[in-house]
């Protein structure tokens, strides 16, 4: 055990320097709280720095929509908040239907959202899809359009939140893996090879590695890692402005201003949690490349420049855990974003700061409680309904 004088102290310790850690740190520091962020590798090394950059409210599970809409507004005014826009481009996001049945599924989805009062997704017909994206294959039948969605640059965004937090006084320690957390009396202790850190409150934003820390607090969470893959093509003349997804098959697709095309869409590669990296499975990438050439036949001979995989946290019900601990006081969690936590980062950081500093977030987080996995379906459904009408 360390001598008390060796222990570095703060009001809040944040374990993990991805977008959720940096954004939460920023929002808390902005309110005068002394924050130390402990990062095992370097800030934005994992999912938050290597993702597809999709800023998407489109297609989200209903309980996440209020969070995504709130976060969307932050994306549109990011420069006012942190002095930097993270490379955000409000390109709109389009989910393409390729058959009449898929278009019917789009109509049903939008009707469901409207029954809950959400109007951010609109069904559009084939002509409108082709007007928006004239290079698309002619077999498309329509789609869903979310006009205020877009994309941003992941590493730039996460670094911008880190720098904004740092400017306000937050400390970031990289190469500082937290091996163990422990509450003694009214304080939390985080033990690392670079010393011991202590604070009244502790936040776990350790992505796919969060389950181990929750377990140390006596909370078993069904969270598992997946290696999500992306590929980037050579440059090609501009042909597509919106960020695209498909209805009947996995796809996430966008062309950057420099002409390269980023292709993904929950493509599962290999996650190596122990060695802290993801690996590409090239056979699976081929399937995704085929979807792209079906939709944009003129890309048939376009070369792929590079491909990579990032380690992402998935939960059993595909919703994140954003919650106070149910077993310990002053312990909080924000992880398990299931492949779509980049868009939520700016907003969830704010909600987490409200949860930790005020005891009550401005949007209910009940659907994301850490103890929901043991609960029966009826009570989880009741939470979701309450959230929608909040
Ligand atoms: C290939 C890919 C494409 C994606 N595309 C999109 C997209 O288009 N749109 C979207 O919204 N989302 C997307 N996502 C998902 C999104 O990137 C993640 O949901 C989000 O970045 C999660 O952020 P995080 O801060 O929770 O986790 P992370 O970014 O994983 O950060 C967690 C950090 O905690 C650190 N850590 C772990 N354990 C410890 C420890 N014991 N001590 C100290 N530090 C620790 C890690 O080193 C890591 O840096 C994608 C993800 C991937 C991998």
Image (cartoon, rainbow, N blue to C red):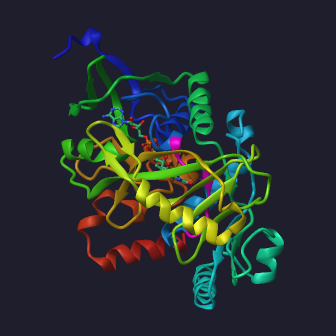
Residue 287 appears anywhere in the view: yes
Q: Quadrant of ligand 1?
A: top left
Is residue 323 among what the camera can see? Answer: no
The outermost residue toward the front is 301
Say whether residue 195 is magenta. no
Residue 53 drawn in magenta: yes
Position of 132 with respect to 123 (left or right) is: right
Look at the image and give the residue range highlighted in magenta.
50-59
Q: Residue at x 38, y 39 (%)?
A: 203
Residue 169 position, x and y percent, is 55, 21
Give x and y (percent) for residue 34. 47, 25
Who's the residue at 38% across and 44% down the image?
Answer: 278
Dominant SS of magenta comes to: loop
Task: Name which residue lies at 67% across and 56% down.
Answer: 254
Q: Please tell me whether residue 33 is drawn above or below residue 296 in the rendered image.
A: above
Residue sticking out furthest to the left: 1
Q: Is residue 168 left or right of residue 19?
A: right
């Amino acid at each position: 055990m360390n001598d008390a004088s060796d222990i570095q102290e703060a009001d809040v310790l944040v374990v993990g320097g991805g977008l959720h850690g940096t954004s939460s740190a920023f929002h808390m520091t902005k309110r005068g709280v002394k924050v130390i962020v402990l990062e095992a590798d370097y800030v934005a090394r994992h999912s938050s720095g290597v993702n597809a950059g999709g800023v998407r409210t489109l297609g989200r599970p209903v309980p996440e929509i209020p969070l995504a809409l709130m976060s969307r507004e932050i994306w549109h005014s990011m420069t006012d908040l942190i002095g930097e826009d993270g490379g955000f481009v409000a390109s709109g996001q389009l989910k393409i239907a390729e058959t009449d049945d898929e278009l019917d599924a789009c109509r049903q989805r939008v009707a469901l959202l409207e029954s809950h009062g959400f109007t951010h997704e609109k069904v559009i017909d084939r002509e409108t899809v082709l007007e928006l994206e004239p290079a698309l294959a002619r077999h498309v039948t329509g789609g869903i359009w979310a006009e205020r969605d877009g994309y941003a640059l992941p590493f730039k965004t996460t670094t911008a939140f880190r720098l904004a937090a740092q400017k306000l006084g937050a400390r970031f320690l990289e190469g500082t893996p937290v091996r163990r957390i422990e509450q003694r009396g009214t304080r939390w202790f985080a033990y690392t090879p670079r010393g011991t850190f202590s604070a009244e409150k502790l936040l776990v934003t350790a992505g796919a590695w969060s389950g181990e820390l929750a377990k140390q607090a006596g909370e078993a969470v069904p969270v598992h890692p997946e290696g999500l893959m992306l590929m980037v093509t050579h440059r090609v003349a501009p042909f597509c402005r919106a960020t695209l997804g498909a209805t009947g098959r996995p796809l996430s697709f966008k062309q950057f201003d420099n002409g390269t095309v980023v292709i993904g869409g929950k493509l599962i590669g290999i996650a190596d949690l122990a060695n802290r990296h993801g690996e590409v499975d090239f056979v699976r990438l081929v399937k995704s490349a085929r979807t792209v050439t079906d939709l944009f036949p003129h890309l048939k001979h376009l070369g792929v420049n590079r491909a990579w995989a990032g380690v992402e946290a998935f939960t059993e019900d595909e919703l994140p855990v954003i919650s106070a601990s149910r077993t310990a006081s002053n312990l909080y969690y924000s992880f398990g974003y299931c492949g779509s936590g980049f868009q939520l980062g700016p907003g969830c950081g704010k909600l987490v700061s409200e949860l930790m500093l005020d005891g009550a977030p401005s949007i209910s987080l009940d659907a994301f409680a850490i103890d929901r996995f043991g609960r029966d379906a009826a009570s989880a459904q009741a939470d979701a309904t309450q959230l929608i009408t909040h």
